[in-house]
Amino acid sequence: MLAAGAALVAAASLAPVPGRATPPGLGARLGLASTAFAAGWVHLLLAPEHWGESAILGVGFLGAGLLQLALAIAIVARPTLPAHFALVVLNVALVVIWLYAVFVGLPLGEVHDHTAGGWVVGAGEPITPAAAVAKAAEIAGALWAGAMACRAAPADAAVRRSPDRLGAAAR
């Protein structure tokens, strides 16, 4: 359902509007934003469950979800290199923390019932479908944001080096 909603938003945003050109790069920004949106939504959905285990986990899930949603909005509305780099750093950090939680376990909250569902690969959290969706979105988002930032960085640097910065930026 989440993927269908993201596809509808992307299709509506890319639909031609008479007399108005589609901004360049909008499709790529919407695609990247959809990865952050999907991961952020999963974190917000799982925040109450994790809050029940530990307030620190609940705040972490809530904060991660809100940051990912804010970055999704920023990347569509006003894309900047810092927003792309922030998404890369946040997603990589969340994946690393999750890998530690799966293989070793976090010293927070109750121990999960490993028979309740998910795939157990280590001493920590089982891998649930929701976690797999979030992590796939975060990995894809980190790679995508990094690629977009690397493509934009040389152009941004050229504008900064230009003797006529305002003129070059306006062109």
Image (cartoon, rainbow, N blue to C red):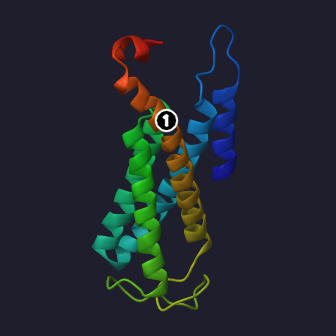
Instruction: Determine the residue positioned at 63% across, 15% down.
Output: 21
Instruction: Determine the residue positioned at 33% across, 16% down.
Output: 163
Q: Mark 1 Cα within 10 Å, few/some/many (few <14, many 20+)?
A: few
Comparing 171 with 73, the one in front is: 171
Instruction: Determine the residue positioned at 70% across, 33% down.
Output: 11
Which quarter of the figure has residue 25? top right
Residue 149 place in picture, x, y as percent: 48, 42
- Total numbered labels: 1
Any part of residue 150 in sight:
yes
Residue 170 place in picture, x, y as percent: 43, 13
Any part of residue 49 in sight:
no
Comparing 30 with 55, the one in front is: 30
Left or right: where 120 falls relative to 82: right
Asked if residue 130 is positioned above or below residue 17 in the image, the reply reads below
Residue 102 place in picture, x, y as percent: 49, 82
Q: Element type at marker 1?
A: helix
Q: Which amino acid does label 1 sit on?
A: Ala
Asked if residue 127 is positioned above or below residue 140 in the image, the reply reads below
Name the residue carrying label 1.
Answer: 152
